[in-house]
Amino acid sequence: MNGVNSAHNTVSDVFQDADLEMMIRDPHRFGVPTFEEFCKNPDKYKMPKDWLLQAISDQPGKSQIGHLVRKVVYRCLGFDCSTLEEVERMAENEGLHLTDLDVRPQMIQDLAGKYVVRVDFVRKGTPTPKELALE
């Protein structure tokens, strides 16, 4: 059942208890290939940008975790965008293509137990807030 075993009820339960060692030891539990499987056919595991954008834009409730998502918020180069088309236009206005941007999704839990998914589109190579804090 897509990385969810009988000891856990939801996908988020599987990842809540996860650590890197567990993921390396049993990658199939988390829905990812082993290193050897990836090396044999890396293209099988790479998702095209269009697929990623479609997965992000799916309305809450239509995906496996959609019932947990209250809303999706987009930011491109630090500016709020209401749609993915607006993200694409903003990137083009800056002379960039979507492939020039890193996609950094975050799930932020609200008080009702649902999540706001914030998807930041930043220039490739831009340090994460965590990396900036370590400097």
Image (cartoon, rainbow, N blue to C red):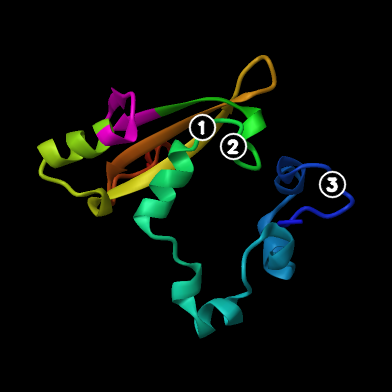
Q: Position of residue 134 (x, y in %)?
A: 43, 41
Q: Which residue is mark 2?
A: 62
Real-space CA distance between mark 2 and mark 3, rounded to the nearest whole angstrom: 21 Å
User: Circle 3 sits in a helix, a strand or a loop, which is it?
Assistant: loop
**Extreme residue in the bottom direction:** 40
Assess whether residue 51 is covered by the magenta stretch: no
Whether residue 77 appears in this view of the structure is no
Q: Is residue 69 left or right of 2 when viewed as pictured? A: left
Q: Residues within 10 Å of mark 2 (few under 14, many from 20)?
A: few
Q: Quadrant of residue 135?
A: top left
Do the residues under discs 2 and 1 have CB atoms within 8 angstroms? yes
Which residue position is annotated with label 1?
Answer: 59
- What's the residue at 45%, 66% (across, down)? 46
Q: Which residue is mark 3?
A: 8
Q: Given the current orientation, which residue lies at the most extreme top position?
A: 111
Q: Residue at x 73, y 57 (%)?
A: 3
Quarter residue 74 falls in: top left
- Give, as a three-letter code, the residue at label 1: Gln
Label 1: element kind: loop
- Give, as a three-letter code, the residue at label 3: His
Q: Is residue 8 above or below residue 3?
A: above
Left or right of 135? Residue 28 is right
Q: Residue furthest front?
A: 62
In percent of the image, x 16 and y 46: which residue is there? 96
Task: Name the N-terminal-most of marks 3 and 1.
Answer: 3
The part of the chain drawn in magenta is 74-85
